[in-house]
Amino acid sequence: MAHNIATINGKTAMAFSGERKAIWHELGQAVGQNTVEWKVIANEAQLLWKTVKKPLFSRQPVTNAVFELPDMVAVHRDNDGGYLGTVGKGYELIQNEEMFRYVDDLLEAENGAHWDTAGALGNGANIWGLARLPEVSRIKGTVDVTENFLLFLGSHDGSTANEAKLCRTRVVCQNTLRVALGEAGKALKFKHTRNVRFRMDQAKKIWLGIHEDIREQEEKENLLATRLMTGETMVSVLNKLFPENPLAKGDARRRGIVEMVLELFASNDGNMVPEIKGTAYNMLNAVTEYADHFRGVRITAGRQGMTETQARAENALFGTGDSLKNSAVAVLLEETKDSPIRGEKIVSKPIVTSDGAFLKALGIRA
């Protein structure tokens, strides 16, 4: 999937609830807060169009004869003719309206749910929508709150199946935090085949367990908030999340990343939630903050005109930054399972970085 916000009808193909502007770094058009009607946010995100199939033709090089390709068609937008991709003739078109209405159906019983952001990526072939759920998650004994969202992704070029899954944002630092739920089946995916709509209807029954999914993730975060990071666990976690590149010359890049994550870990979001300081949850937030706000990004040809901050914001939800955060949850749960509990006396080796011993343990030259 491409990771750049599309431009459609001369506008950035993205819209957001007014209160989310800080997260998305000024991208797109603002709509009123607590928008419930999907057409409002879809209109501002430039998504009120339909897809159509058009035949593909080829020219025979010797006779110069033109003939229609029998098995392939092109997918275009109906409003401006914009080309989205080439697919097989059996590819079932799922319109943007269907995707938005599907999410509306999933949220039908969620009193207080509303649309948060929506937009298109690349040439407009990949679209997404984000709806905020009324249920929040909390770290016990703290003011740390995480909001829960339903994220759907769809494509019109055959590059991906449509997908709906849980997505989360931690209020304290306003980081986008999409986390793995531990089971691939938790994401609802639909390929563009003939029976796709039947499978979408069947999947609605599965999604009734969303509250169980939220509670499971809340339990994982509360567990991480009780486990203290030691020198040994920190080395193990960093080595898995930021492994040494044997082909890289020197350790400058990796050292910079590790030192940045350690600095963010020590800061603990300015110690806004002191109860989690030094815990694995503190470390998860440090990795998230690094991925969302400090991780380097490339301004590729498809991102021309975008700032580094805007490109990083896209990566945080759709790209490599998202993958890093997913990995962090699993790695931290595994590597800290035998760690001391918050409130207990730490008998393991403490985290020491000032004398270079810690970096040396990571294989980084001081």
Image (cartoon, grey):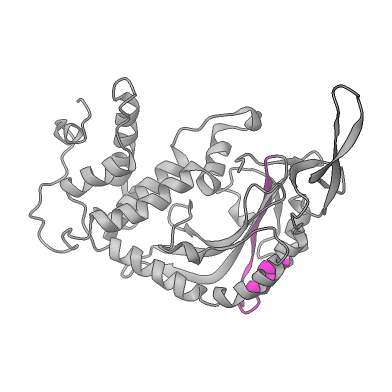
Say left or right for 218 vs 39.
left
The answer to whether any part of residue 279 appears in the image is no
Q: Residue 183, image x and y in percent? A: 43, 64
Which residue is located at x 10 percent, y 47 percent? 349
Residue 63's quadrant in the figure? top right
182 relative position to 359: left or right: right
Can you give x and y, in whole percent of width and height, for residue 39 in the image? Answer: 78, 62
The residue positioned farthest toward the left in the image shown: 347
Q: Which residues are magenta?
A: 101-122
Instruction: Locate residue 6: give its quadrant.
Output: top right
Residue 24 seen in the figure: yes
Report the side of 304 relative to 169 (left or right): right
Q: What quarter of the picture does the C terminus occupy?
A: top left
Whether 259 is among the magenta residues is: no
Magenta stretch contains residue 119:
yes
Which residue is nearer to you in this view: 189 or 139? 189
**Count of labels in the image:** 0
Q: Position of residue 310 (x, y in %)?
A: 58, 38
187 is higher (above) or lower (below) than 85: below
61 left or right of 239? Answer: right
Residue drawn at 62 percent across, 79 percent down: 109
Q: Percent from the top left, x then y, of residue 286?
A: 35, 47
**Image quarter hosting the N terminus:** top right
Residue 3, placed above or below residue 165: above
Please tell me which residue is depicted at 29% across the width and 61% down the height of the picture: 224
